[in-house]
Image: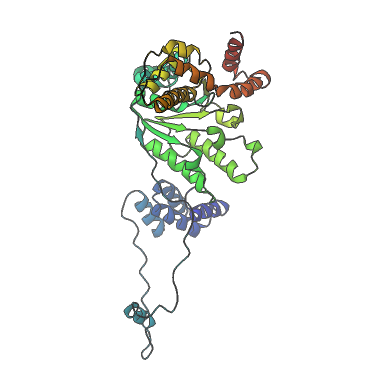
Amino acid sequence: MSDSPLIDSLAAAVEARPDDLTLRLHLAELLVGAGRGGEAIGHAAQVLAREPGNAAAQKLMTSALGGPPPAPAPAAPVEQPPTGTVDWAAMEQDLGDIVPPRFSHEQEPVRGHEDRTFDIETSTITLADVGGMQEVKKRLEISFLGPLKNPKLRTLFGKSLRGGLLLYGPPGCGKTFLARAVAGEMGAAFISLSITDVLNMWVGSSERNLHDLFQSARGHAPCVLFLDEIDALGHKRSQLNSSSMRTVVNQLLTELDGVDGNNDGVFVLAATNAPWDIDSALRRPGRLDRTLLVLPPDKPARAAILQYHLRDRPVAGVDLGKVADATDNYSGADLAHVCETAAEFAMRDSIATGEIRMINQQDMLAAAREVRPSTDGWFATARNVAMFANESGEYDDLAAYLKKRKNR
C-alpha cells in the first residue's frame, strides 16, 4: 500500500478494468507526479502496446524515463465580471484590513501523520564496555560481527548482511546497552524505537510510522535498528481484539521481509521480557529467526557494574567481590539501586553527625539485604514456559539455566 489513497484506489480500478486505457493513463500520470516512474512506465507501456500512436502515453513514458515532465494543461481563462457588476474578490482584497470577509475559506485542519525525523545515533559503546556475558558476545560475533568484518568469507559462504536477532530475558539486564554496543562495535548507525514512536490514533499512521522508520534505517546502512519491547508492537494477532493493531503487526512483517525495500545492511535487534507473547510469524526464518537469552550478570559482570556505579562516589574499603557474591541473580538495574541505597545510608549518617563519611562495606552489604532481586518474578513465569510450552525447543537455553540455578 502506498502513501496515496487516490493512487491505491485507481490501481484497484485499473486491475478490475485493465482495458480502460484512459483510466490507466490517469494512474500513470499520478505515479509520475509522485516520483514512482518505474510503475508509471509499466502502465504507459501497456497503453502503447494497444495504441502505439497514443501521444499522451508517449509523453508519460518520456517523463517516467527521466525526460521533461508533460506540459500542464493550459489554465482556464479567468472570467471577468460583467460591466456594471461589483468585483467582490478585488474589494475584499483591498479592504481586508478594515472589513472582515463575507465568507470564511478556512478549512478544518487535517489530522493524521506528521512527517518526522528519527534520531540517528552514533554509538561510542563497544562490547569491551559490556561486563561478562561471554556467551552472549560469542553468539553476536557469529551472527553479526564476524560476517561484517570478513567480507570475503561472507561472500564465500553466501552469508547475507540482513538478519534479525531477538534478545530476551529478565528486565534490567542490559539488552538495550548490548544493542548499543553492537552498533558501536560495527561502527554502524543506531536507531532505537519504542511503541510510542509507532502507535498513532489515526488510521494508517502507525503503519506509515513503521515504514518511515525502516526507510530511514535503509538510508543509513549499515544500521542497527533496535525494536524495544517488541512484544507490545508484535503481539500475537490471535490475542488482539483491535483490527488496527493486527495491521501494525502485518506491516512489521512486511518491513522485516524487505518487500518495499532492500534490507541489506540493516541489522534488526529486538528486545523483550516476554518472548512467549510475540506473534510466531515474527520468528520465522528471515525475520527475528535467531534468539539470544540475556541473563542476569554473572559475578565478574556484577563486580564491574558495581564499580561503574561507585566510580564518582566517595568509597572506602569496599570489597567488590564479596558484594558481588551477595547479589546473585540481581539485574544491572538492581545493582545500580544497591549503590544508590548504600549512598543514602552514608549520607544519612553524615547529616546526623555533621561529619562526612565514606561509603563502606557495611553500607553495601546492608543495601544488598534491603534491595531484593527483581528477576525472581520473571523466572517464576519463565519456569512455567520452559516446562510446559517448549515443544519446539526454542527455550532449551532457558530450561538449562533454570536447571543449573536450581542445583546451586
- Is residue 219 shown above or below 293? below
**Residue nearest the observer in this picture, 146 or 277:** 277
Residue 69 sits in which quadrant?
Answer: bottom left
Callout count: 0
Q: Residue at x 50, y 29 (%)?
A: 271
Q: Quadrant of the C terminus?
A: top right
Picture colour scheme: rainbow
> Percent from the top left, x then y, of residue 284?
56, 27
> Percent from the top left, x then y, of residue 338?
47, 22
Residue 321 sits in which quadrant?
Answer: top left
Relative to 229, 189 lies left or right: left
- Is residue 247 shown above or below 126? below
- Is residue 191 shown above or below 202? above
> Percent from the top left, x then y, of residue 34?
40, 52
- Is residue 340 shown above or below 81? above
Does residue 213 appear in this view? yes
Task: Name the residue furthest top.
Answer: 407
> Percent from the top left, x then y, of residue 372?
55, 22
**Residue nearest the observer in this picture, 109 or 131:** 131
Relative to 97, 157 lies left or right: right
Task: Name the residue furthest right.
Answer: 388
Task: Name the residue furthest bottom.
Answer: 84
**Residue nearest the observer in this picture, 159 or 121:** 121
Does residue 155 appear in this view? no
